[in-house]
Image (cartoon, helix red, strand yellow):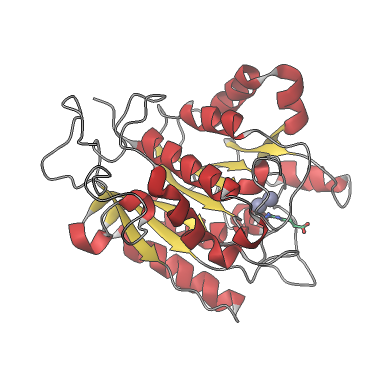
Amino acid sequence: MQPTPEEPRDRDIRGPVDASVVPRFAGIATFARLPRLDEVGRAHVAIAGVPFDSGVSYRPGARFGPAHVREASRLLRPYNPAQDVFPFGAQQVADAGDIVANPFDIAEAVRQIEAGALDLARHADKLVAIGGDHTIALPLLRAVHAKHGPVAVLHFDAHLDTWDTYFGAPTTHGTPFRRASEEGLIDLTASMHVGIRGPLYAKSDLDDDERLGFSIVTSEYLEENGLAAAIDRMRARIGDAPLYISIDIDVLDPAHAPGTGTPEAGGLTSRELLRMIRSLADRNIVGADVVEVAPAYDHAQLTAVAASHVAYELISAMAPRA
Ligand SMILES: N=C(N)NCCCC(=O)O
Ligand SMILES: [Zn+2]
Ligand SMILES: [Zn+2]
């Protein structure tokens, strides 16, 4: 449909392809059918894929996540009533393509992802990255730190991802937030995991995690105390610190997001996750990622639809309010 008259669209802002002119299922799948970054030159928000999954401990396949999420994002529409915002009209959003990373050398891949994110920072104020496995959060946080200093990390995940090493390897999808904490990339007073559940390796995992600067809203806390209480804790912890949001799609229950590499029972609904993101629209979100979508285990695009809506809600929360 045409943008409605009340849409606060700046004449210079280029939005998605009009779905009443070109059907949604036609054309190249940029995220939400937005223009490419090289077509608009500069953007407030760039979306980039990071098709890297050499850091996984279990099922591989998240390297195919960016293409799968873009494909499912064709159905997104210009107006988000839940936030009363036109996410692609209130700001220029563009698809920057994929950041290239060496699949055979994790250390080099991590350097490439950081360099790619820093390069994009010259053309876009904020980056929303689509993974890829959770390893990519480390180089993305390094790039964010270069611009903002230590940031509050709000991490939605079934897993802590503050473990030390796997098979002696320090850089994996189970370790990004330990490395980030050790490097001083995160604000130790304002960071939090949400949705943690399931088996750990040892009780001391939780002590390590606290020492590394995280507090936790578990899935059980949410179940017992309700969404509003969980949101209150989250908002109180973050305060007004610059905020980086990292969303592992396995924070959702496997019923909502089966297409992922390390699924855990008893997770959030997509409705709960979307509302939690919405509650952050008044905060200073400086960047975000949505990771761990592995299409080989998906069904009927369930996981990709969830991930594309999560990204849409993030971009909406980043949009300036009139
Ligand atoms: N970041 C994700 N999705 N998973 C980490 C799980 C690490 C493990 O196998 O214990
Ligand atoms: Zn996880
Ligand atoms: Zn994770």
- Nearer-the-camera pick, 37 or 109: 37
Is 121 rendered above or below residue 303? below
Residue extending farthest bottom: 104
Q: Residue 19: x and y, percent? A: 28, 44
- Nearer-the-camera pick, 265 or 144: 265
Q: Is residue 203 visible?
A: yes
Ligand 1 occupies quarter:
bottom right
Task: Classify residue 86 as left or right of residue 246.
Answer: left
- Nearer-the-camera pick, 40 or 308: 308
Q: Tag count in the figure?
A: 0
Please give the name of the residue rendered at 36% of the width and 64% of the height, measured from the top-left corner: 97
Q: Residue 150: x and y, percent? A: 49, 47
Is 15 rendered above or below residue 59? above
Using the rendered view, name the quadrant where residue 206 is placed: top right
Please give the name of the residue rendered at 70% of the width and 58% of the height, measured from the top-left corner: 261
Is 26 rendered above or below residue 172? above
Q: Is residue 41 visible?
A: no
Is 163 rendered above or below residue 21? below
